[in-house]
Each structure stands twice: as C-alpha cells, then as structure tokens.
Image (cartoon, rainbow, N blue to C red):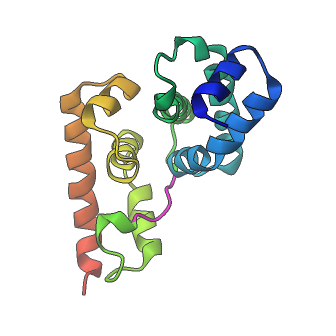
Amino acid sequence: MDLQLLIEKCLTNDRFAQRTLYENYKDSLYTIVYRITKDFDAASDLLQEAFIDAFKNLASLKEPQYFHAWIKQILVRKAYRYLKSKKDRVSLDAVAEFGYQEEIDVGYIEKAIQSLPAKSRTVFVMAEIEGFTHKEIAETLNISVGTSKSQLNYAKTKLKELLKPHLV
C-alpha cells in the first residue's frame, strides 16, 4: 500500500493501516532505540510510545514521505529523555562505521562506546550511525548546533584515545 494512502487511512483510525505502518517501520526504529538504550524492554516500550505519539499527532505531518524521519525524531527524543531520567550509562551495538573493524575486536569498540557519557554517545550514534545532520540532532535533543558538533568531536577524540592502544 502506498505510504500516502496508508497515512490517510491511519488518520481515520483504521487499525489495519496503523498496524501495517507499524510493521513497516518497527525493525529499523527498534534498532535505533536499542542502540541508544541497550535495554530490550526500554527499547520496546519507547518504540510503542513513539508510535502512540505519532498516531496521535499524525495530522501534523505535512509531507507523508518524511514519516520515517519524523517518527525517528520522536523516538530519539524519547530515548534521550529516558537516558536523562535513568542517569546511568548504557551501551550501544558495535560501530563498524568508525573504521576499526579489521584491526580491533568489535566487542572492544562496543565497550569503548559504552564508556562515553550519555550525551556524547547519543550524538555519536545519531551522527555517525543514523546519519542525522547537526541541525537535526540539535533540534531533536534541544541543544545548539555547536554543542552537537562539540559532543561529536569529543566522542570521536575519546574513542580514538581508547582504541589507539589496540590498533595493530
């Protein structure tokens, strides 16, 4: 079913259309929220909450083709608030994109990322794994673009420090 039509049906509270939309996006969104929280239960709960919010506010989505980006922002905001309220460190999946996949054990990369503070870890995941721009990160996390850039730079510098002794 066409995304435009699917969203139109969701606006009329068509449960089949809502379920279809959920099924189409749940896996990619779950991966994002799990990478941020590293908690299966929290990731599932936050995913459900994000879809509930999305369905409640679907009428505000002006361009249906941007649904995935829109709900991803809702989800990342929820995950970030969850982390702030939890105030402890969470882990992320290994980041092959960081460039050390052949030289360093993937498990060590994961541990290095886990050791980052929550804000810089979140910015790192959003920018380097999910491809958000600094403007999108700033809007999502309610920080400035400069803070986003600074947090990403800090995360990369810290990861390079942590990973340097393990390079061949």
Left or right: where 95 falls relative to 68: left
- State whether residue 121 is above or below residue 86: below
Q: Residue furthest right?
A: 15
Left or right: where 9 falls relative to 130: right
Residue 92 forms part of the magenta stretch: yes
The spot of residue 140 in percent (x, y) is 40, 27
Where's the N terminus, which quadrant?
Answer: top right
Instruction: Using the image as rendered, state which of residue 123 and residue 127 is in the foreground.
Output: 127
Most common secondary structure along the magenta stretch: loop
Residue 108 forms part of the magenta stretch: no
The spot of residue 113 in percent (x, y) is 40, 58
Q: Residue at x 56, y 44 (%)?
A: 33
Instruction: Using the image as rendered, state which of residue 129 and residue 147 is in the foreground.
Output: 129
Q: Residue at x 54, y 35 (%)?
A: 79
- Name the quadrant containing residue 137: top left
Region in magenta: 91-95
Q: Is residue 45 visible?
A: no
- Name the quadrant containing residue 159: bottom left
Q: Residue at x 40, y 43 (%)?
A: 122
